[in-house]
Amino acid sequence: MDLDTVPESPPRKKRRPALACEQCRRRKIKCDRLNPCQQCVKANIGGCLYIHDSGEMLTTAPFEAQDIQFSVFEQMPRRTTSATTAALVTPNTPFENANGSYSDSSSLASFLESDELKPVPALSPAVWPLGWDMELTNMFEDQVSPMELTKMLEDQVSPAEPRVLPPAKSASTVDSYYTTSTSLQGIFRTKFHRQSHWTNFAYQSSEVMTVMQFHEADESKHDYPTFARCKTLAKTIKLQEHIAVQPNTSLRDIIPTKVVSDRLVQAYFRTFQTVFGILHVSSFREQYKAFWEDSRSVSKAFDTTLAVVMCIGSVFCLPETGVSRATALQWIDIACLWLTSLKQRNRPSLEVLRIECLIVLARQVRSFSGDNAWLSTGCLVRMAMHVDLHIDPEAHSSPKMCPSDVEEQRRLWATIVELELQSSMDCGSVPGIACDDYDCALPSNIDDAHLEANRVSGNLITAKPMDELTQSSIQILLMKTAPIRLKIARVINNFRSTLSFEEVLSLSSKLSEALKTCSDLISSYCMSSTPPTPFQTKMFDLLVQRFVLVLHQPFAVRAILNPAYYYSRKLCLDTSFLLTSHLARSGDDDFYHLRLCSKGPLRVVYAQCALYLCGELTNQSEANQASSANPANTFMPKELSKAVNKYLELAVARMSCGGEKSIKCYVLVSCLLAQADAVHEGLPVDQAVSKALKKSLETAYSLLKPQAQDAPERLHAT
């Protein structure tokens, strides 16, 4: 072809429209697309010039909201708004798709500023699952400075119509921190947390977040407790605690007197031994007697076992023993050091596995930080499988074993499975074992004394009927529900799995059937002459009922708008009421002391219950406010508030005795409860939330500050 006849190429068009004004584009700085934008105001430039398709126009934004939606973000999920479902949307808050799952909105930074997302005076879902960061201090450090945040709030937020602050992070930065893949089911904070982690229960409303931002932004102007100051205090206490409990002596030098040791050992045997059955009771008692006759006659392994047992028992009898927290934590440290050196030289044994189980429990009941329980129990599972503990000796052609030894192996394996289950739920991770990975039979329903008698005589073990309570009955009931609980934990904590409502109902039906059988047996135990202790029954409820709550929670939060999920909502409410009812002290001194000092399930489950009840209370208040009459499917607000207040009282008691140093959940629950009460009574929400925020921070600060000032003395006195 002649070059002169070649048609001129059409001008190349931009693949996406420009959103910034011409001045900001030329200077290559971020534009907020106002008229005039903040950058042009600082540069003393008059109006902002927005150019689109070579056409010049002076406007407050380059495009209408619908143009932005379909041209730039047409592949992004979008939450539809209506008169009954419009919501205040905060940056980095997941959107709810049509199928009910949540996807990230952090890359929709520009879209969040459109006029369509301004709040409207109509019913809105009060709270939505927490975004990528629960830590308010990190949020301010990563986005804007307190001074800049204050100016932005003064310029853009008014009491009559609060606006959402645009995120200062770039889209690429946010995307690297919080995934945009809809196939991932969970929440990213410092790491990925699946459905059973407590942060998936944490809810925020725009009103609460706005008040928190104002409070933190005024930190440089006023000297009052803030979230950042409380967090600094907590870190200081933890650091001082770790320095103070470094072992600088031998284990036998810090063993208390025999009278005190007897009380500590007895406290362990009446509590955790009746639930988990870790120790071989007769062997321990023989060595314990020999230890006080001649300490040189027992092994170093028994010294370690005794120290960890006393550490656990010290939680239940603090006033009468005088064992300090520093001494108890030193026992844990020395036991860990000895166990580490032993594992480097020898093959795992049943004795080592028992000590590992005891250390996992001791770290939890003493709230000893610096260890991930899920990692410890995962290692414990593999050590147990390495010595074939998961294979039942009587079901295979294994070497002939004494019936009592077989029973001890079954009890120890049941303990390891339960510890792995609970740690996976606490951490929001997949259990390291499935039902098909073991065939170890259930422990026999027999008391320790009868088990030892059978060992001496060499006779076969004769188990009692299951309707008779023994020292292993609670552990058997836990193990009966373990298969379905393992399946639930694996499904809900698999980061790519999405459960339909039908699948949830199927799993729930199987768990309910197993629970009904166990509940009937526990009821029969309570009617006998030797009923179970409150510690046993409440521990069983706590360890099992938490699976009901976590399984149904994703659908329960949507039941306020979709009555088809009412069953999940009802189960979550009933379970939350049941578990929070245990917070009332009623003849359960052992369980009460454990609630004050322990982490793990004793902290996570009650926080989940309180957060769910806050969401339910807030949703009900807004639903009642938007409708002329109360819906028929609401629950009593006073009962909900009473249950949440029980958690707040527990949180304060935990902070006062040193069992709790993190205030995130306590502050959030206080603010959400104040918001719900204000909406229900028709009072100003901002004032109520601000008052609750200041009060909760002042309470937390007043409880943490003395501990940071005299941490060494306090450790040696408590």
Image (cartoon, rainbow, N blue to C red):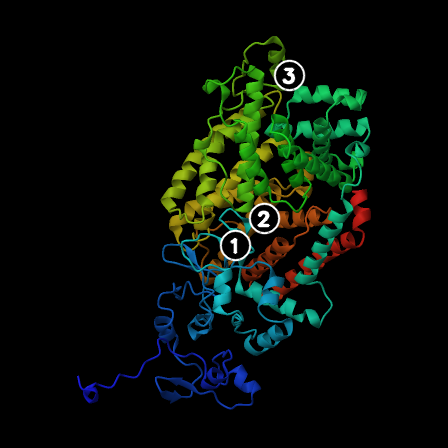
The CA distance from mark 2 to mark 1 is 12 Å
> Nearer the N terminus, badge 2 or badge 3?
3
* Residue 457 horizontal side relative to residue 16, left or right: right
> Which residue in the protein does label 3 denote?
449
Disc number lying in front (2 or 3): 3
Give the quarter of the figure containing the C terminus. top right
Q: Residue 526: which quarter of the image?
A: top right
Q: Secondary structure at mark 3?
A: helix
Disc number lying in front (1 or 3): 3
**Where is residue 1 shown, x and y percent of the image?**
17, 83
> Which residue in the protein does label 1 denote?
615
* Residue 174 horizontal side relative to residue 81, left or right: right
Q: In the rendered view, would you say 639 is above or below 109?
A: above
**Where is residue 209 shown, x and y percent of the image?**
57, 64
> Nearer the N terminus, badge 2 or badge 1?
2
Question: How many C-alpha atoms fall within 10 Å of the one at disc 1: few (<14), some, or many (≥20)?
Answer: many
Q: Secondary structure at mark 2?
A: helix
